[in-house]
Image (cartoon, coloured by chain):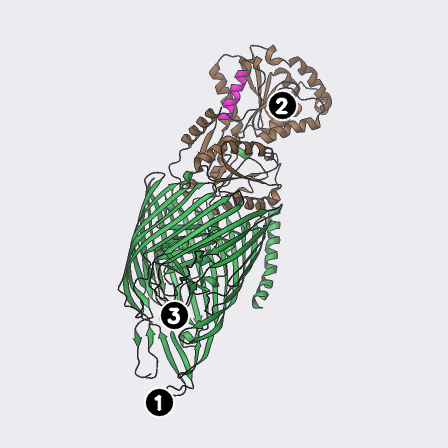
Amino acid sequence: MLISPAVKSNTASSFRCCVALCLLAFSSLGAHAGILHVTLIPSRDNGAYQHVIDAIVARIDEQSQHTIVLKTISLDDFKQHSIKIDQTSDLLIPIGIRATGSVIRQAGNSPILATLVPRSSFKASLKKRAAEIPSPPPRNISAILLDQPISRQLNLTRLLLGNVKRIGIPLGPDSQSLHHEIERTTQQLKLSVEIENIDSAKNLMHQLSRLLDRSDVLLALPDPTIFNRRSVRYILLSTYRKRIPVIGFSQSYVKAGALAATYSSPEQIGKQTAEVIIALQKKPARGFPAAEQPKYFSVVINKQVARSFGYTDLSAEQLARQISQLERKNQ
Amino acid sequence: MHYKKLFYRLLPALLIASSYSTSANESLPPQEDLLLSEEDFLSELPVVLTATRLSQPAREAPAATTVIDRDMIKASGAREIADLFRLVPGFVVSHDNGYTPIVTYHGLSNEQARRMQVLVDGRSVYSIVFGGTKWTDLPLAIDDIERIEVIRGPNAATYGANAFLSTINIITRHSSETNGVFARVNVGNIDIRDGYLRYGDTLDDLSYRLTLGYNRDTGFADRYDTHQVRMATFRSDYQLTTSDTMEFQFGFNNGEMGVDSKTLNATDEKNNKNHFAQIRWQHDLSTDENFSLQFYYIGEDTAQIYDVYIPVLGRVVANNSYTANRLDLEAQHIKQLARNARIVWGGGIRRDSAVASGYFGTKATLYNNLYRVFGNLEWHLMQSLLLNVGTMLEKTDLSGTEFTPRIGLNYLFNPVHSIRLTASHGSRTPTLAESKSNFRVAVYNSTLPTLPSTPADFTSTLWKGNENLESETITSYELGYMAFLPKKGFTLDIKVYREELEGLIYMDENRVYTSTDYYDFRYEVSGNFGDATIYGTETTINYQPLQDTRFVLSHSYTKLNSTLPKLLPDQGNQTAPKQIFSFLAMQKFLGRVNGSLAYYFVSKSDGLGSGDPIPAIKRLDLRLGLAFSGRKMRGEIAAIVQNVLHDNDYIDWRNDNQFERRQYISLDVQFN
């Protein structure tokens, strides 16, 4: 409505325009001291995204200082009115990777705090923007990631299965970059790990079966080349045939047949997002935070699968508590 | 020749199947965007490990179970599958000759260990004519085995008659897990020459493998028991739809073995052929319900005729040849009735047939039909209390109808400790040989001086079956305790049991003279001769204290009281060794050196059939392997020495079998 047709059709000029406008808003976090205008942009308007929004709203309402003004707009609306929105917001919060991709590409200079995004895709979106658009991206871009820290997943594995098992980890194009972190963490935790690089979905079965030959437990790290809707059946059946438990990365993987997982629900991600917003409002001097991994998490166990592996009386809550304790100790 | 033809005939079918699989795949939606999305974390996935697919854990099983995994198979240094059972408490592995392993549990066995069911991927390889398992004749490469589960105790409720004293369940590797080229070569003393070659591939929903094998050795010194066996097996698994899977297998082997007969003082050669084909369809009706249908065929073919001159007696011809087939169809339905209850039930029909003119005294085909229904209910009365109730109703032509129930109660005190109490009843139906044999030898140009009226040519019965045999029965009571500490890598299983066996069938006794055949030899008739009571304890410990260190220990104490008459004057009744002990230690050094040690002790025992009284056996086996790997390959070269101890040759089953030290080098390479 407020955006001229020219802007719509010409991204380059709209971008320049954006930059100009946003330069004004640049120091927004400091300048508007007092009231912080936050725009939430969910990728879709269904369940999980709404849960994130609800959690953010609820947490901020608890503060009830009316210094944070939340506004939710749809991704389509954002795409159409990005300049206007950018102008009127002190902070953009795209929820999910689709929104994050669009916001990073189209936003002007408002700080961006993406949330509910996988680490590898968030990085890929930044890279993509850099490749497509010559001008520098907004300085303040960060994210609340969906991926659990490696150490958390390894701690769960260790608590369930002890230290003597060989942990097999398949790494694909998306998770390749974790190689060093895995090696560092497993050394710290004195765990033995077997890593197999899966170069393409085509070779998945061959390479995975090679890995299973030298693993006692399989740790699944999010990577769509390896763990996707199509491969879930193959992976869970072949590991089970070899009596190799799988530590998954999501609730749904556990439901499908993985033994257990640490995961963060949309609510938990929302809560953490709200806390970052509040911190930005209260202590702007601290600056924009770096990308964060989930602080709040749960453990989920597939009781039937656990029983078949001989585990009875496993308590998800207790495991989560134990993991938190271990994490506190290490800090 | 024949098989080759069969293979080429099947090849096009295979190609069609694989091309079908690719076309089926095109209909699947393409992977949208490979960028990881939060939806990969949040969206629902199909439930893969459904309640019906999950197997009962050891802690909840109504019987003691020993699992032999691939690490143990490798570390044991075993060339032959039968040798692996030395690691199972209560089991004794011996040899009637170099290529005829005898695997027994709780004694009472002659060279055909008939009181044990053996299944390979659900296919009964219980030998059709004589019972027992012809281990060397299984078309099965040891490297294709994923795992062996040994259920110690009667298990008729699940596996039917002949799952009498125990059941061995051999599970081969899924064909999607044997991709690429694998080769193994063993070379050693006693002319050990083995070679295996396997190729496997996975094409989306279809996977297959083909294994070719050859093995050979000269057996025991001073015996004519050389053997060489060639084999080929094929397995293919096909994911038809998300709820249907097909498994297809076939295999065959043929080999030549040397035979020597003490009684005839003669040597000869025999030719054995075995083949099988198997197909299984599994269908998920829902996540709580699964149906499977399996059909298989096995064939056994042995050709051997003694034709010898025996001084005084004349020319004797004994025909040991036979051809036998088994056709078996089985359907099974698993249903999760409620959160805490699951039922498995099904039924099957089987037809065994055999032609053995020498053994049966007729050229006709003899049949044994079997019909059965079975069911087992697993019911969690409480979170920590599980009830297993099962039964089998089985009817065979040879012995009528058997009802074999089992009831088991498992109490899981806490995550570590559990106990089980099981009472079960089992039966063993007579084999075709026990029921119908009429083994006759022909004598020509007889010069028997003592019987002047003896004709020059005559036939004489050596042993006879008995069509009135009843099934052997067993009633078993078992108290088990398990400690399960997965984080410490420790499991302990102790079993205390009592078994009451009735109507044991033997044919080594009861020599009969018939007046009409006055020149006949005395012959033997099989009968339900005796009863036995067995009690004892069995213990297994599996302990992996460190990443690279693992121990597997087993011990059994067996007390056997049998009312069997002494079968031969020099044979005693203690056919089950009182003490059996095995210890397997595995240690990995420097990441690529695999060392293992296996020690076996079997206290003295008496033999049945061809068996002799055997003094205690101590045996130490060592294996040292060096792993290597390249960019697309990995492998290991290993040296294995069996019976290392100096001056420790032992008698294996019979006095003329001296088990001397054996050593061989094994090289394996996997490319993929």
**Residue B526 against residue B533 in the figure, above or below:** below
What's the amino acid at mark 2? Phe
Label 2 sits on residue:
A78
Front position among marks 2 and 3: 3
Numbered badge on residue B433: 3
In depth, the one of B507 and B393 nearer the eye is: B507
Decide whether residue B639 is among the magenta residues.
no
Q: Secondary structure at mark 2?
A: helix
Q: Is residue B620 left or right of residue B236?
A: left
Front position among marks 3 and 1: 1
- The structure residue drawn at horizontal position 47% and vertical position 49%, both measured from the top left corner, is B596
Over which residues does the magenta segment extend? A268-279
Decide whether residue A278 is among the magenta residues.
yes
- The structure residue drawn at horizontal position 68% and vertical position 26%, both measured from the top left corner, is A130
Q: Main secondary structure of the magenta part?
A: helix
| Residues packed near mark 2 inside 10 Å, few (<14), some (14 to 19) or many (20 plus) | many
Q: Residue furthest bottom?
A: B452
Where is residue B662 drawn, in percent x and y?
48, 59
| Chain identifier, colour green | B
Residues at marks 1 and 2 on the same chain = no
| Chain identifier, colour brown | A
Q: Is residue B293 left or right of residue B564?
A: right
Where is residue A265 drawn, in percent x and y?
49, 29
Residue A149 seen from this side: yes
Where is residue B88 drawn, in percent x and y?
39, 53
Residue B201 seen from this side: no
Numbered badge on residue B452: 1
Chain of the residue where label 1 is placed in the rendered structure: B
The Cα atoms of the two marked residues, 2 and 3, are separated by 85 Å
| Residues packed near mark 3 inside 10 Å, few (<14), some (14 to 19) or many (20 plus) | many
What's the amino acid at mark 3? Ala
Front position among marks 1 and 2: 1
